[in-house]
Image (spheres, coloured by chain):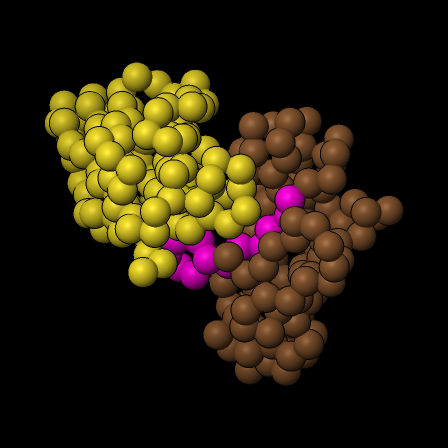
Chain colours: A yellow, B brown
Amino acid sequence: DTEVTQTPKHLVMGMTNKKSLKCEQHMGHRAMYWYKQKAKKPPELMFVYSYEKLSINESVPSRFSPECPNSSLLNLHLHALQPEDSALYLCASSQEPAYTEAFFGQGTRLTVV
Amino acid sequence: AQSVTQLGSHVSVSEGALVLLRCNYSSSVPPYLFWYVQYPNQGLQLLLKYTTGATLVKGINGFEAEFKKSETSFHLTKPSAHMSDAAEYFCAVSEEAAGNKLTFGGGTRVLVKP
């Protein structure tokens, strides 16, 4: 199994809603990542979890809250988002934090209304 | 600090023609280099990577890239384009000094004409 599975594929939420994005991998990878990708732009790193601990936060606003319940799961909790937060959110994993190969999920297309 | 520059945000090729996507990087130490492909509304898929060893790297779908340290380049090529190659391509670099974070280039959208 070389897949990173993200749910949901699409999400529409209001600015006062609370929602969560989920990511799962069963490759035994010990590093997991959240990226944000705006249209026609490259992915931008948001968070890195290394061995289930948050190792990098790229100065992301607190309305985005990551969580790593175990080595296979990664969540991104969303609260009080703004319309400009609408984007494709990508999860990725790699065997170790040192990049040798990162596997990406299909992404969650988020629209904030 | 590491950075990646992809020359040309759009490339148009005819089916069967050579595909050449240019990537130049800046890094204080020998980096890891990657090419990813992204189809519409999809995640990123790794095409190939350079870590150490042979400088000519072969990847999936007939793509290959050559690491040229003297030119700080990692250009991607495919001898004969197929309609299914139409996608967005990202060059990326990571280095230990940057916490092994992936830094992406701006991307190149490939259009394949029949």
- Percent of width and height locating residue B77: 68, 67
Of A100 and B93, nearer the camera is A100
Give the residue drawn at x 68%, y 62%: B57
Report the side of B55 relative to A106 (left or right): right
Give the residue drawn at x 29%, y 48%: A25
Is B43 within the magenta?
Answer: yes
Report the side of B32 relative to A74 (left or right): right
Q: In terms of secondary structure, what is the magenta stretch mainly?
A: strand
Of B15 and B78, nearer the camera is B78
Is A27 within the magenta?
Answer: no
Does the image show residue B25? yes
Report the side of A48 relative to B70 (left or right): left
In the rendered image of this protein, does residue B50 appear above or below residue B59? above
- Percent of width and height locating residue A11: 19, 43
- Percent of width and height locating residue A77: 22, 28
In the rendered image of this protein, does residue B35 appear above or below residue A66? below
| Residue numbers of the magenta segment | B32-45
- Percent of width and height locating residue A61: 35, 18
User: Which quadrant of the figure contains the C terminus of chain A?
Assistant: top left
